[in-house]
Image (spheres, rainbow, N blue to C red):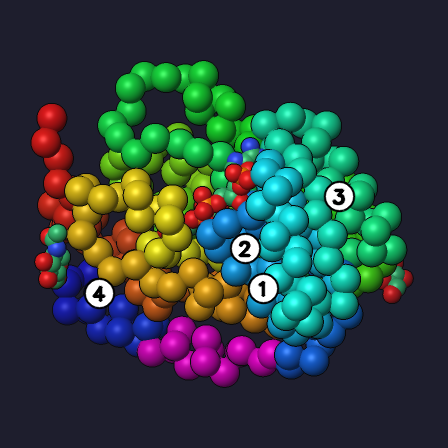
Amino acid sequence: MNIYAKLLLLCSIGVAFIAVRWSATSFNEESLKGARVLVTGASTGIGEQLAYQYARLGAQLVITARRGNVLEEVVRKCKEMGAQKAFFIPADMASPPDAERVVQYAIEQLGGLDFLVLNHIGPSPYSMWNGDVEHTRWLLQVNFLSYLQMAQKALPTLEKSKGSIVVVSSLLGKICGPFTLPYAATKFALNGFFGGLQHELAMQKSNVSITICILGLIDTDSAMEKIKGYINMTAYPAHESARHIVEAGASRQPEAFYPWYTFYACLFRDWFPYFRDLAIQNSYTYNP
Ligand SMILES: NC(=O)c1ccc[n+]([C@@H]2O[C@H](COP(=O)([O-])OP(=O)(O)OC[C@H]3O[C@@H](n4cnc5c(N)ncnc54)[C@H](OP(=O)(O)O)[C@@H]3O)[C@@H](O)[C@H]2O)c1
Ligand SMILES: *[C@@H]1O[C@H](CO)[C@@H](O)[C@H](O)[C@H]1NC(C)=O
Ligand SMILES: *[C@@H]1O[C@H](CO)[C@@H](O)[C@H](O)[C@H]1NC(C)=O
């Protein structure tokens, strides 16, 4: 195919996708009143904002992360904002028994589960790969294997409630970039696993929906701290990203993109690989 044919095809596909995307979003906020929701990584950042979004809509919440004292404060705010119930459970996802204990706790406290929102990530350096394999092994447990454990533990309950699993992933799980190799590997793994699980559940006529959320740069403290001096790009607000995630999960979208450019980045990804890689490498500052 010559380049003009490619461009024309690309434009048509783009227009078709936009049409589908805007027509597909239907979301009744009332539907989340009383919904039983477990949010991980909810002590700060996007997870904290997710908790507030569900609280605002009158959900019943269990939130988790490692720091109990911080979670306690988030729970207090959730109750103020309208959560029917709000509980917290401190847990470290680096420890496999903790991942299962959290789901068990949520099912017991809420009498079942409608939404399992998997969002936590372990801290990872923002720098060129230093050859540390052990860190990647550890991060795979925190960012990836714990997600599988929690999904496995929650699936029977979600099957009964016609519930949903929401996986917070990243554009860095779709397109390769420098400085975050272990992190990106865990996000590619998540997209691969839960994308495949979507097929298997559909083939089994399962009642459970899976929403994979592809996020671009969001203005959480941890992200802003990391990228400082490396890349100068617009970060989108965490509360807006949380609103999109909640909406995508509730309307059972298989894949959700925020902000808008992530959708086009994924669409264009393999069309002009040479220019893509040039653009990626030139957008970072690197001073060895
Ligand atoms: N911010 C962005 O630019 C961006 C872009 C794309 C995708 N995302 C995705 O969005 C999600 C949230 O990102 P974020 O920026 O909000 O992250 P964040 O601010 O760093 O928050 C991470 C959360 O995970 C918890 N956590 C860390 N280690 C843990 C462990 N070992 N066990 C259990 N919980 C742990 C933290 O709480 P404790 O420290 O209390 O444990 C915190 O609540 C992630 O999945 C991330 O990949 C973010
Ligand atoms: C879906 O839910 C219905 C009850 O609402 C149940 O009968 C059916 O077995 C469930 N499907 C699966 C695959 O478990
Ligand atoms: C980042 O980019 C904006 C405009 O694109 C510019 O105004 C600003 O000075 C840049 N900041 C740094 C630190 O380079």
Q: Which residue is mark 3?
A: 103
Quote the CA–CA distance across marks 2 and 1.
Answer: 7 Å
Q: Position of residue 14 (x, y in %)?
A: 33, 72
Identify the amino acid type marked 1.
Tyr
Quote the CA–CA distance across marks 3 and 2.
Answer: 18 Å
Q: Quadrant of residue 187?
A: top left
Identify the amino acid type marked 4.
Lys
Between discs 3 and 1, the one toward the N terminus = 1
Q: Residue at x 64, y 26 (%)?
A: 95
Which one is closest to the eye, mark 3 or mark 1?
Answer: 1
Q: Quadrant of residue 65?
A: top right
Q: Secondary structure beneath disc 1?
A: helix
Q: Residue at x 62, y 32 (%)?
A: 92
Q: Is ligand 1 closer than 8 angstroms to the Cβ of mark 2?
A: yes
Which one is closest to the eye, mark 1 or mark 4?
Answer: 1
Q: Is ligand 1 closer than 8 angstroms to the Cβ of mark 4?
A: no
| Disc 1 packing (10 Å; few <14; some 14–19; many ≥20) | many
Q: Is ligand 1 closer than 8 angstroms to the Cβ of mark 1?
A: no
